[in-house]
Amino acid sequence: MSPLTSEAKFTLTLEYAKSLVDPLAQSDWAPLMGVIDPDVRWRIASETNDLKKMTGVFNLSTWMEQISGPLVKRLVNDAPPQFTVQYLQTVGNRLIMEAYGQAVQKNGNPYQNTYAWFFTFSEETGKVVEIHEYLDTALVQEVVQTNTL
């Protein structure tokens, strides 16, 4: 349940943020994905779309179609990486998170990446309306090039 005040304005709390990201440790994205606005502006490392590096600007459906789906299909069990949150902070309606993700690629190599995410939540809806994501795009490019779908 989202923390709305009596004026129906969303206020982000650290406790609420933890409820969204703690399940990532079990590769469970459902709580976090449930609060992402379909029209989110999800920027990964660059304004320029480059699907070989999986960078660019996406909404939720294009992120799932062009980024998450193709990456997960290159990992063992077709499952997203397990994440360990290393840093979590809320500043107003912004969530700042650093996390370490690990999985095994289908070619047997480890997938070990560090991510930094900056989420902006809408005061009106409590949904994530903007995400800036940073990660090792060279590693992602290697995963794409060395693991067939």
Image (cartoon, rainbow, N blue to C red):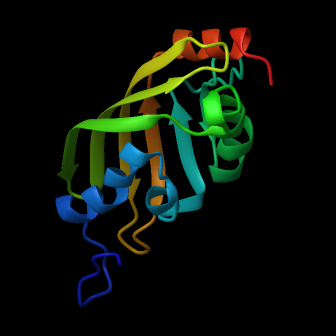
The answer to which image quadrant residue 3 occupies is bottom left
Whether residue 13 is visible, yes or no, is no
The residue that appears at 19% across and 51% down in the rendered structure is 91
In which quadrant of the rendered image does the C terminus lie?
A: top right
The residue furthest right is 149
Is the residue 28 above or below the residue 139 in the image? below
The residue that appears at 44% across and 22% down in the rendered structure is 135
Is the residue 107 above or below the residue 28 in the image? above
The residue that appears at 35% across and 70% down in the rendered structure is 123
> Percent position (x, y) of residue 139?
53, 12
Whether residue 23 is visible, yes or no, is yes
Does 32 sit left or right of 76 as displayed?
A: left
The answer to which image quadrant residue 148 occupies is top right
> Percent position (x, y) of residue 1?
35, 78
Does 147 sit left or right of 90 as displayed?
A: right
The residue that appears at 42% across and 47% down in the rendered structure is 26
Q: Nearer the viewer, residue 147 or 8?
A: 147
> Percent position (x, y) of residue 129?
48, 56
Q: Nearer the viewer, residue 49 or 72?
A: 72
Does 115 sit left or right of 57 as displayed?
A: left
> Percent position (x, y) of residue 63?
65, 42
Is the residue 92 above or below the residue 81 in the image? below
Does 146 sit left or right of 129 as displayed?
A: right
